[in-house]
């Protein structure tokens, strides 16, 4: 696998650089979850002294020929950390991040799972103190009520801008609705069923109850006002079913009167 070849080159490079004190692999490859030929490598470079790499491509020559790269700043529990996203000509993407070894003097929560690739002075012990437990607590009733309440506010925007025929803007709102309101409730449905989820809705077809999976297409409309209205009413029906499923299983209150009132208002906007 190309990933393994690139990883071997990165390890060889790390061993050859005096300022590199440790190399850590994180992300899906370290977790050994859903890895395929299109997976990225997430490499943390723990270094001592001045940072002499992380900009430009010359330092990457020992690893491979670069097609495109992008330097960024990443906010972490330890503060801001420089990163460099790289796509090599062989198609492998590597996200490098650069961590001063001094940060390990005060371990911070960061890693879900990691693999130490290079360790020149037994830093693994300190690095492993940065591992956090990735467990999501059940949804609280207050958070559930927030999600339901905010969903209807967002649907009010959808209806208003569909009426104005601003399809582009509506599509953006709908993307936020899927991520911010449907996804947390979908994850709660999976927890109720005792099924482990994946981040950001990845592999949702495998962990979401099948009764809801078959309804997912209704959350996506074409670039058309009429189809936008169709999708809105279908997503309302799905949201009602999902929220009712969570409410019944968690013994949460579902404020039906307000929901019916909002549906009537949305209908009024559509037909005005």
Image: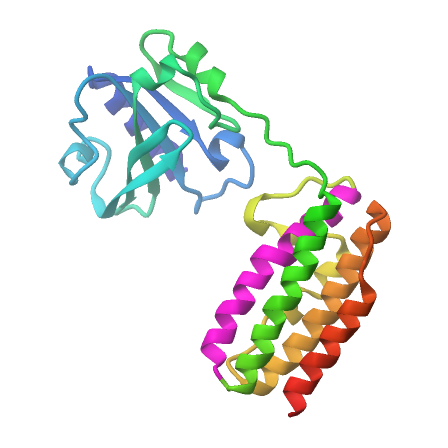
Using the image as rendered, state which of residue 150 and residue 74 is in the foreground.
150
Q: How is the image coloured?
A: rainbow
Q: Which residue: 47% across, 34% down?
A: 29
- Could one spot residue 89 in this view of the protein? yes
Query: In the picture shown, does residue 207 fall above or below 158?
Result: above
> How many tags in the picture?
0
Q: Is residue 167 magenta?
A: yes
Q: Which residue: 65% across, 43% down?
A: 197
Query: In the picture shown, does residue 50 fall above or below 196?
Result: above
- Could one spot residue 207 in this view of the protein? no
Q: Which residues are magenta?
A: 166-193
Residue at the top extreme of this rendering:
121
Quarter of the image where one finds residue 7:
top left
Quarter of the image where one finds residue 155:
bottom right
Q: Is residue 139 magenta?
A: no
- Asked if residue 110 lies left or right of residue 45, the reply is right
For the stretch drawn in magenta, the main secondary structure is helix
Q: Position of residue 117 (x, y in %)?
A: 38, 20
Using the image as rendered, state which of residue 54 and residue 41 is in the foreground.
54
Q: Position of residue 228 (x, y in %)?
A: 59, 80
Residue at the left extreme of this rendering:
58
Q: Position of residue 164 (x, y in %)?
A: 51, 86
Quarter of the N terminus within the rendering: top left
Query: In the picture shown, does residue 69 fall above or below 255?
Result: above
- Asked if residue 244 lies left or right of residue 267, the reply is right
- Asked if residue 173 lies left or right of residue 120, the reply is right
Q: Position of residue 42 (x, y in %)?
A: 39, 35
Q: Which residue: 37% across, 39% down?
A: 2
Quarter of the image where one finds residue 149:
bottom right
């Amino acid at each position: 696998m190309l990933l393994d070849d690139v990883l071997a080159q990165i390890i060889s490079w790390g061993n050859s650089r005096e300022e590199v004190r440790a190399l850590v692999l994180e992300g899906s490859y370290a977790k050994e979850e859903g890895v395929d030929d299109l997976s990225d490598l997430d490499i943390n470079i723990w270094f001592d002294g001045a940072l002499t790499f992380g900009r430009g491509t010359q330092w990457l020559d020992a690893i491979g020929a670069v097609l495109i790269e992008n330097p960024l700043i990443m906010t972490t529990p330890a503060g801001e950390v420089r990163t460099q996203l790289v796509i090599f000509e062989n198609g492998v993407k590597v996200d490098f991040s650069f961590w001063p070894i001094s940060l390990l003097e005060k371990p911070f929560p960061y890693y879900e799972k990691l693999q130490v690739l290079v360790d020149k002075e037994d830093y693994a012990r300190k690095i492993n103190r940065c591992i956090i437990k990735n467990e999501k607590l059940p949804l609280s009733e207050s958070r559930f009520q927030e999600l339901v309440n905010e969903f209807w506010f967002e649907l009010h925007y959808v209806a208003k801008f569909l009426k104005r025929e601003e399809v582009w803007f509506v599509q953006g709102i709908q993307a936020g609705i899927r991520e911010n309101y449907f996804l947390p409730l979908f994850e709660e449905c999976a927890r109720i069923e005792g099924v482990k989820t994946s981040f950001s809705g990845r592999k949702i077809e495998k962990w979401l109850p099948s009764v809801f999976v078959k309804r997912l297409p209704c959350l996506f409309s074409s670039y058309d006002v009429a189809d936008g209205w169709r999708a809105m009413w279908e997503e309302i029906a799905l949201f009602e079913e999902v929220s009712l499923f969570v409410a019944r299983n968690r013994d949460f209150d579902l404020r039906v009167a307000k929901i019916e009132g909002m549906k009537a208002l949305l209908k009024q906007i559509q037909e005005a």
